[in-house]
Image (spheres, helix red, strand yellow):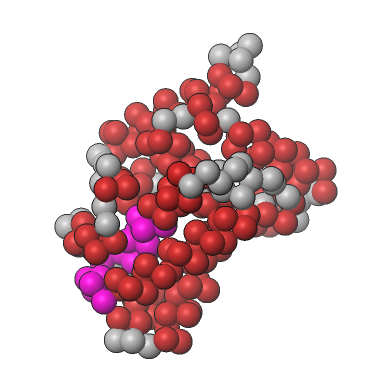
Amino acid sequence: MIDSLKPEALAGAVAAQAAVAENPEVTALVMRAKEGDADAFADLMRLHERRIIGLGLQMGLRREDALDACQDTFVKVFKYIGKFEAGRSFFKWLYRIAINVIYDHLRAGRGAPTVSLDELDAGQAARAEGEAPSLQARVESAQLAQRVRQSLDCLSRRERIVFVLRDLQELSTEEIGVILSLSQITVRRHCMSARQKIRQRLLPRQS
């Protein structure tokens, strides 16, 4: 179970995975943060906080609760970063902690988010030749995102996180497997099941 992994055990869990090449800038910041460099830790937060907030929104938190979950995530990271083993993927370790924290907030009864144009992931907005999306395209994208997020309640817990990481966060099957300690076959199975359930919810007549 994902939520059964305590932060102090996460470093060891990730260390058991094959070494993954990390961005040299991130590696340097992590090493400095492990040594107590507050500026380096602040830089790590700035590099990752947007994606953690986005993950919270995509998992079903309201924006204010996603912000709180992001803050709680980095509180835990600060507490346990000294146990993080150099040479491993900080990003994947961070995501494992974030997922646990977000589930804690969801269990506390946070409601479904409202979706605004400003909350759309800039990386997913429009990819055609780098052009900015039209207002209509952004509105349609926001509406679709809202419908998809409202459909997540039909998924099991494991299906939900796999779907969010694969289709919304755009992580690879291999990355998700490392983060969740699942085989790639299991990740694909949960992803296919989640997509089918969401398709049935959004397009019942075409399923």
Q: Residue at image x 45%, y 87%?
A: 39
The percent position of residue 107, horizontal first and vertical second, equals 45, 44
Q: Quadrant of the C terminus?
A: top right
Query: Which residue is most to the top?
Result: 205
> Is any part of residue 76 visible from this angle?
yes
Query: Which residue is most to the left?
Result: 16
Q: Is residue 13 above or below residue 90?
A: above
Along the viewing direction, whichever of 190 and 123 lies nearer the viewer: 190
Query: Which residue is most to the right?
Result: 135
Q: Is residue 64 above or below residue 151?
A: below
Q: Quadrant of the N terminus?
A: top left
The percent position of residue 11, horizontal first and vertical second, equals 24, 64
Q: Residue at image x 29%, y 71%?
A: 80
> Is any part of residue 180 visible from this angle?
no
Q: Is residue 144 above or below residue 15?
A: above
Q: Is residue 205 left or right of residue 24?
A: right
The percent position of residue 17, horizontal first and vertical second, equals 20, 56
The percent position of residue 18, horizontal first and vertical second, equals 20, 57
Along the viewing direction, whichever of 113 and 207 lies nearer the viewer: 113
- Tell me the magenta residue range: 82-98
Q: Is residue 91 magenta?
A: yes
Q: Is residue 83 left or right of residue 154?
A: left
Q: Is residue 148 above or below residue 44?
A: above
Q: Quadrant of residue 162?
A: top left
Q: Is residue 19 magenta?
A: no
Q: Is residue 54 left or right of residue 25?
A: right
